[in-house]
Amino acid sequence: MAIFSYSCGYGGVHRAPDTPEHTCRIDGNTVETLVWNAVVELLKNPKLISQAWGCDEAANIEQGEKERLENRLRSLDRQQERLLDLYQDEQIEKPSYLVRKQRLDEEQKNIQTRLLQIEQEAKSEQIKQELIEDFQQYCQRIQENLANPSPDLQQEVIRLLIDHVVVGKNEIVIKHIVPTDDDCRLKPQRLDVEP
């Protein structure tokens, strides 16, 4: 096994103005073993991705809000009709009609805007669910190679799932990739590592 280390390139000339000058070095085998173990743990528990997103909870909350807003929108439509009837029957004056109509129009517009947001969030949620399913399939395909992976497989999997590693004084923090709609490394076309 080769002996190598990682060092911080931002402790000297390239450091941030508020960062003191420093030199940090850590054993490469130690870090790579810890990172690989974290990746293996994620691959053995793909549900961690859905838990990180809170997918199921968000969908239920949005569905309840959507139904409530749609009911309110129907109620506002009925109020608009009654208001128009009152005005046409000359039971209210035009200035009063216009003020009340404007209030109803504004509320309807706000509700329609929120319903559009909920629809977009639902589409985003569906994409997340598809990505989670793709990730779970990927995890199933790669399971048998986790015990004794080739270096190429390790590198590909690490590039796919790890954003960055932060080495502190007494800790190592491994930042996993949680796929998003905008920048996703786990889209189906990216899941082409064969076991």
Image (spheres, rainbow, N blue to C red):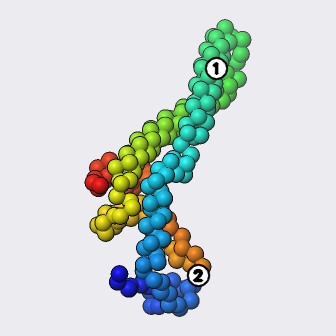
Q: Nearer the viewer, residue 149 or 153?
A: 149
154 and 159: which is toward the camera:
154
Q: Residue at x 53, y 91 (%)?
A: 21
Looking at the rendered image, the quarter that the C terminus falls into is bottom left
Could you tell me the amino acid type at mark 2?
Lys
> In the orientation shown, which residue stands out farthest toward the top?
89
Residue 38 position, x and y percent, is: 48, 64
Residue at point 49% right, 37% down?
A: 122
Give how far across and how far down residue 146 sits, in percent.
38, 59
Observer-nearest of 69 and 112: 69
Residue 123, located in which quarter of the rendered image? top left
Q: Residue at x 63, y 27 (%)?
A: 68
Residue 131 in view here: no
Distance from label 2 to label 1 (Cα)? Answer: 60 Å
Q: Nearer the viewer, residue 110 or 54?
A: 54
Residue 99 vs 123, above or below: the answer is: above
Disc 2 secondary structure class: loop
The amino acid beneath tag 1 is Ser
User: Is 96 drawn above or below residue 84 in the view shown?
Assistant: below
Q: Residue at x 65, y 13 (%)?
A: 82
- Residue 1 vertical position relative to residue 177 in the rendered view, above or below: below
**Quadrant location of the N terminus in the rendered image:** bottom left
Q: Label for residue 169?
A: 2
Residue 75's label in the rendered image is 1
Q: Count neighbours of disc 2 (C-alpha within 10 A) and say few if under 14, some if 14 to 19, many if 20 or more.
A: few
Sooner in the amino-acid sequence: mark 2 or mark 1: 1
Q: Is residue 94 left or right of residue 17?
A: right
**How many other residues sit within 10 Å of disc 1, few (<14), some (14-19) or many (≥20)?**
few
